[in-house]
Each structure stands twice: as structure tokens, then as C-alpha cells.
Image (tube, grey):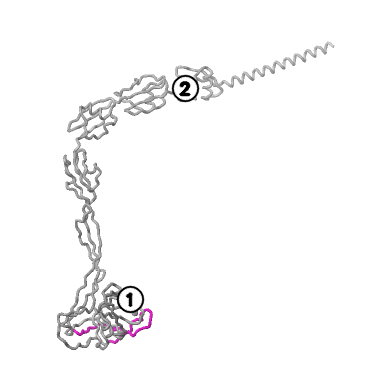
Amino acid sequence: MYYKKQKRKLCLRIAALAAAGALALVLIAAAVMKATAYSVSGTVLDGESTYSVKTGEAAPELFLTAARRQGMPELGPSDTTEFDGESCVLTVLRGVEMKVTDAGETTAFTARKGATVGEALKENGITLGEEDIVSPDRELVIAADLTVDIKRCCHVTVAFDGNVEKVMLYGGTVAEALKEAGLKFTEDMACNESIDASLTDGMEIIVTRLTAFTVTADGKTGSYKVSSGTVGEALEKCGFALGEGDRLNIPKGRRLTAGMKIVIQRVQVKEEKETQDIEYGTQYVTSRELAEGKTQLLSAGLKGEKELCYRATYVDGELESRELLSERVKSEPVKQIVMRGTGLPTAAPKLEFIDDGSGATPDPTPTGGKKPSVSVSAQEGVLTDPWGNEVSYSKAITGTCTAYCIPGGTTSIGLEAVRGVIAVDPEIIPYGTRMYVASPDGKIIYGYGVAGDTGGACMAGEIIADLCYDTVEECSIIGRREMVLYILQ
């Protein structure tokens, strides 16, 4: 019984010792954890206040939290921090709003609380000269939002009428500098700087007198004032551009004087083309069959055409001159042939012609229709007309011809339909071709003519020519017969 009691006591003592050991281990672990949680010591500087902090790691956020537990004010929207990880020092930079007026211009930025005005200006890129005036003083320590005014010391030169004045002002405008120099600026003066411009150190202000003058150009006359210079410079300042050929009544290089009247004449030079008719001439032949003093048109004339190219000069829109540059003939005129009567009646001579006797070759078949009887002399020759004139021809075409008349009418190309006009196929005999027409035996003579109409039967290939007469009676002379067309050279 005794041993049982002793054994029980021993077990209780062992249990107590075990519980005490476990508690000790818990306390030791807690102490270790606490020591680990605050293993980093640091400092927070906020202006004149210093806070010693301990944290588990070197983190700015933990430093700020620890400092706030010690009563540090919260950071404002303009406040910033700087953290030095090696020394574990966190510096709080309290910001203040700072407005600066410098040479009339105002800027705003966040300045560092505790810095001087001069330091804040320098940190924000504003450089001060030794003679510049800063209000409040540049040595003032910033404790709250602040407005700063800077008056720059400006050494300025004012030049007018050969006189130069040097003045010094703290800030101000060009107008104030002129006043300081004793110069009254009027509307008859000009300045190289705007009157309202802010002064800068070293500025050179040049004042000149304005010269009044007039300009007449483009149909208008206006009055202008500019600083002295040449006529060309004055026009440029007033916005007048001169073209390459424009004229001035006064040379551009002449000095501008008061009251000068400048006239600009706008000059345009351009090429112009026009088409003109070339009048046809007249070739006369004589006939003893026609009464003296009488004439008869044998072959109508045809006007030619030429193109003329001019260089035209216009001054203020009015034509001043035209110079002929070139002339090109587009088509040669064809002479009209007129018969003059001599009043000496005689029998009409037979047609005589001189040929080389080389024979004839067939003409190509005209387009469409039945091929008429056509032959073409392959060689040139000379014929003698009934009036004794020797005429050269390039070839002779023999074929069927007819006659027509259109009293008071015109041809397809606009000629008067009179004797001497011959209707042809222009693809075979071009318009304007001069011809002499007679029968192969020379007994029937149509005479001289010009291709000046389009023959429908000719185009159909039925005939080689349709001879125009003034009357139906004359047409009956030809009727429908074989004729020779001598193509004249």
C-alpha cells in the first residue's frame, strides 16, 4: 500500500515537470518569434521630428506604420519619402504648393517643406541671377504653401535715330524700357520687339520711324507705313509679291521716302495660236472666142490655211504687243483660173499635147460599183491648151465623166458650185487637185478645174469625175462620155 502511494506521487511529479517543460518551450518559442519579428532597427525623419522604429524587415511601409504608432502625422497628397536601405533611414519630405511669377509668367509646382525659397526654385529648374529680386527672400525656409515673385534685373539697350541708351529695370515690358530711356513711342514709329513683350537681360530694342507711301496694284491703291528700307523691302513687308515680268515705276533697290507713290504693273507673257485663211490668187488665160473685156471663170479657187504662233504680252490684263514666232502652212491655196476675152473670133483650136507615148496603165478599181473604163498615163507630159499655154501635168487619167449643175448652190466642202469645180472620189483624187479636162480626141474641152466636191457616182466607182457647169445646157455638151483628166503639176 505504501509503495503504491509513493509510485503515484512520483508519477504526479513527473507529469508536473513535463508540463513545466512544455510551458518553458512555449515561452522560449514566443520569445524567439518576438525577437525575430522586430529584428530590424531604423529611423524615420520628419522635419524636426525623429522616430526610432523596429520592424521585421527594412521596408519603407513598415517604417511609416511604426512611426505613425508613435504619433507621426499621416502623409499628405503632396508628401513624398526617400529611403536609404543601407542606413535604414526613411526621410519624409513634406510638400507645399508653390506659385512663382517670373517675368510676367506664372508657374506652379510642389516644393519641399523645410527647404529655402532659393533651394526650392533651383530644385525646380529656376535659375536666379545675383541681381534678381525675389519676394519673399530667397533664404526664407518654406513651412507652408507659398507665392513667390521674381523680378529679373534686365540690362537693356534702346536705339533710336542714332542714339543709344542703356537702362536697367527689374522686370517690366518693352514699353517701360522705352519710357525709362526717355522715348515716347507714337503710331509713326516701329519697334523690333512687341511693345508688350517682357524684358529679358541683354535685350536690344531698336525703334525706327515709319515712312508713309502708297502702292497701286491689281486695280487698287492703298496707303502703307513701314520702317525705312528699300522699295523692294517695303513691298515685301506689305505683302506684295512681284512676278518675274512685273514692272515697277521705281527701282526696287531705291531707298523708300515719305510720300512715294509706287505703281506695280502685272505682266503676263504667253504663246497664242490662231488659224488664218490664205487667199487664193488668180491665173488668167486669154480667148479670142470671148468678147473683149469679158471674163469667164474656168476653175474655182480654193483658200489655203495657215497656223500662226505669237508671243503675246499683257500688261494689267490689256494686250500690249504680239510678236510672231512661227508660221506653218497647213494647206496651200489653189488659184482660180479666169478666161479673158480678146474679141478676136476664131475657130477653137484642137487640144494638142505632147506625151512620151509610153502607153497607159489601168487605174485601181474604185471602191464599190462597176469598174468604169479608166486608164492612167504613167509618165509626165506637157500639153498645149486651146489658148496656146503650155502646161505640165504629172499624169493623165482616162475614164467616164458626167456633168451636173446646182445654180446658186455650194459643194460638199463649201465652195460655190460653178464651172471649174469637179466632183471626185477624194481618196483617189484629193480635194484641191488642179486638172485640165478634155476628150481624148480634143474636140470636147471642159478646161481647167479643181477637185472641190464629192461625187456620189465617183464614190460608187461608176465614173471618174462629175464636171460642174453653170447651166443645164452646158451639161448636155458632156452628157456621159469618156474624158481625160490631166493632173497638173
Q: To which quarter of the image does residue 181 belong?
A: top left
- The crowding category of the residue bearing disc 1, from other C-alpha atoms within 10 Å (few below 14, some 14 to 19, many at least 20), is few
Identify the residue shown where x is 17% and y is 33%: 161
Q: To which quarter of the image does residue 480 belong?
A: bottom left
Tell me where residue 345 appears, x and y as whole percent: 16, 87
Residue 172 belongs to magenta span: no
Image quadrant where one finds the N terminus: top right
Image quadrant where one finds the C terminus: bottom left
- Determine the CA span between mark 2 and mark 1: 109 Å
Tell me where residue 285 appears, x and y as whole percent: 18, 80
The answer to which of 198 and 82 lies nearer the viewer is 198
From what the image shows, is residue 13 above or below residue 303?
above
The answer to which of 248 and 468 lies nearer the viewer is 468
**SS class, disc 1:** loop
Q: Earlier in the sequence, mark 2 or mark 1?
A: 2
The answer to which of 184 and 106 lies nearer the viewer is 184
Residue designated by label 2: 92
The disc at residue 427 is 1
Tag 1: residue type? Glu
Residue 376 belongs to magenta span: yes
Identify the residue shown where x is 24% and y is 70%: 304
Q: Residue furthest right?
A: 1
From what the image shows, is residue 394 above or below residue 232?
below
Tell me the magenta residue range: 358-387
Decide if residue 60 is on the left or right side of residue 480: right
Tag 2: residue type? Val
Tell me where residue 313 appears, x and y as whole percent: 21, 56
**What secondary structure is the magenta-colored segment mainly?**
loop
Q: To which quarter of the image does residue 367 belong?
A: bottom left
